[in-house]
């Protein structure tokens, strides 16, 4: 495992971190298998874990709490998130901050997360949706100052809405935010336009999420793929999205070096960018943990392949199904 500096916080984090949404609530999650996967990741050097109170209403946080107790002598960085009070993902333009992140609510949710995790301090607390229009509002800024002052949170981050990497730029200027979590992968290259240069300028950490485009970039989806009833992916991969996503993933297949599969190519593309502090694939299986962490060997993709992959950039705008 290779390690990178987590922006101005200076933490040394594994460049492959752990995305914990799936194990919290996606169908066919198995706690025992999830715990084995988490343990394996620690054995292989992973030390950065991303969860949220919303993932299974605290279940994912509780699994992380269990992991922490099993490795009391190891520094594992935990990042979690405050859900929007109005339960709307993504947030909508024009919604007042008071509907989403009022001061008391931020304090209250943090206490619940601390309890789920079984810790006295959260390393990184993130806002689970964001509107840059809230940048100058006192409520969230005071909550940040007070939670840091009380020692309950070391640092704050924003997890930006899907396909809106720029909806945080003014907020970063306030100085209250040390990390941004953003979708960045072979398709979604737009964080490179303005978010990454701003993060470099201010030395803000970047957490690259959704490295496989929710599954498309694993190369395992077909136009007929469906998920069990109740799985959120049925509502995300509506026919229009599934068909275009599969077509675009298939277009990558001829580029794959013989020794590589699609998930490895997807991981290496992201790791090639030095602005990324850590990439957090969602994983519930030991096999996936081992394969994804194996991509952290310091070996870059060949330059010509990187250039070819750049041409597969896919700029998307939020729509009714994109969540
Ligand atoms: N708004 C937000 O803040 C937000 C939104 C989305 C995601 N996130 C964070 O980002 C993390 C990653 O995103 P994600 O989990 O939604 O999507 P993702 O990482 O793009 O894809 C996860 C899917 O890829 C599969 N997978 C992982 N490694 C694989 C491999 N080597 N080969 C084949 N399949 C593989 C997983 O399978 P298994 O699960 O079966 O192992 C899972 O089905 C989340 O877990 C969460 O922590 C945050």
Image (cartoon, rainbow, N blue to C red):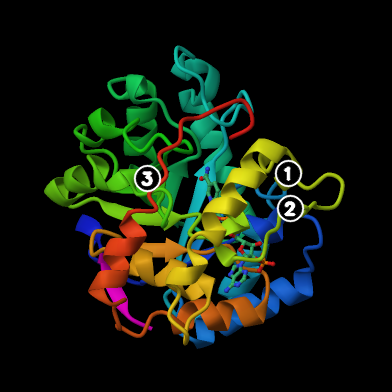
Q: Range of the magenta residues?
A: 1-5
Q: Is residue 55 visible?
A: yes
Where does the image place residue 255, in percent across and percent down from the top left?
Answer: 43, 70
Is 28 in front, or is 34?
28
Question: Which is more N-terminal, label 2 or label 1?
Answer: 2
User: Number of labelled discs?
Assistant: 3
Is 98 in front, or is 30?
30
Give the quarter the ligand 1 occupies. Answer: bottom right
Between label 1 and label 3, give the one nearer the viewer: 1
Q: Quadrant of residue 314?
A: top left
Where does the image place residue 93, in percent across and percent down from the top left?
Answer: 45, 16
For mark 3, does the 10 Å Cα neighbourhood hold few (<14), some (14 to 19), or many (20 or more) residues? many
Q: Which residue ends up furthest to the right in the rendered image?
A: 229
Circle 1/circle 2 CB separation < 8 Å = yes
Which residue is located at x 49 percent, y 86 percent?
Answer: 44
Question: Where residue 157 is drawn, which disc sits there?
Answer: 3
- Residue 318 among magenta residues: no
Q: Secondary structure at mark 3?
A: strand
In this figure, which residue is indicated by the disc labeled 2? 25
Q: Is residue 76 visible?
A: no
- Alpha carbon distance from label 1 to label 3: 25 Å
Against 142, is 33 above or below?
A: below
Which residue is located at x 38 percent, y 80 percent?
Answer: 296
For mark 2, does the 10 Å Cα neighbourhood hold few (<14), some (14 to 19), or many (20 or more) residues? many
Is 317 in front, or is 71?
317
Circle 2/circle 3 CB separation < 8 Å = no
Q: Is residue 152 left or right of residue 202?
A: right
Q: Secondary structure at mark 1?
A: loop
Against 25, is 277 above or below?
A: below
Where does the image place residue 189, in percent across and percent down from the top left?
Answer: 35, 49
């Amino acid at each position: 495992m290779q390690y990178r500096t987590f922006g101005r916080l200076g933490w040394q984090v594994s460049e492959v971190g752990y995305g914990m949404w799936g194990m919290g609530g996606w169908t066919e999650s198995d706690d025992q298998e999830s715990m084995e996967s988490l343990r394996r990741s620690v054995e292989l050097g992973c030390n950065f874990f991303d969860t949220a109170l919303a993932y299974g209403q605290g279940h994912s946080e509780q699994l992380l709490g269990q992991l922490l107790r099993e490795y009391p002598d190891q520094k594992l960085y935990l990042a979690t998130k405050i859900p929007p009070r109005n339960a709307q993902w993504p947030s909508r333009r024009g919604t007042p901050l008071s509907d989403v992140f009022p001061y008391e609510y931020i304090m209250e949710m943090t206490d619940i997360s601390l309890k789920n995790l079984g810790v006295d301090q959260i390393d990184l607390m993130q806002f689970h949706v964001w509107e840059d229009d809230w940048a100058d509002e006192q409520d969230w800024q005071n909550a940040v100052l007070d939670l840091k002052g009380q020692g309950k949170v070391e640092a704050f981050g924003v997890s930006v809405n899907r396909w809106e990497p720029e909806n945080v730029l003014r907020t970063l200027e306030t100085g209250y935010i040390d990390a941004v979590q953003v979708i960045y992968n072979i398709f979604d290259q737009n964080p490179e336009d303005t978010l990454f240069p701003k993060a470099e300028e201010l030395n803000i950490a970047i957490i690259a999420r959704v490295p496989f485009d929710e599954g498309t970039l694993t190369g395992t989806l077909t136009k007929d793929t469906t998920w069990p009833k109740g799985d959120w992916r049925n509502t995300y991969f509506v026919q229009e999205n599934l068909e275009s996503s599969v077509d675009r993933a298939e277009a990558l297949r001829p580029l794959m070096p013989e020794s590589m599969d699609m998930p490895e190519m997807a991981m290496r593309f992201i790791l090639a960018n030095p602005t990324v502090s850590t990439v957090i694939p969602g994983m519930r299986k030991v096999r996936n943990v081992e394969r994804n962490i194996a991509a952290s060997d310091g070996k870059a993709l060949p330059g010509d392949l990187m250039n070819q992959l750049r041409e597969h950039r896919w700029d998307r705008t939020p729509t009714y199904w994109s969540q």
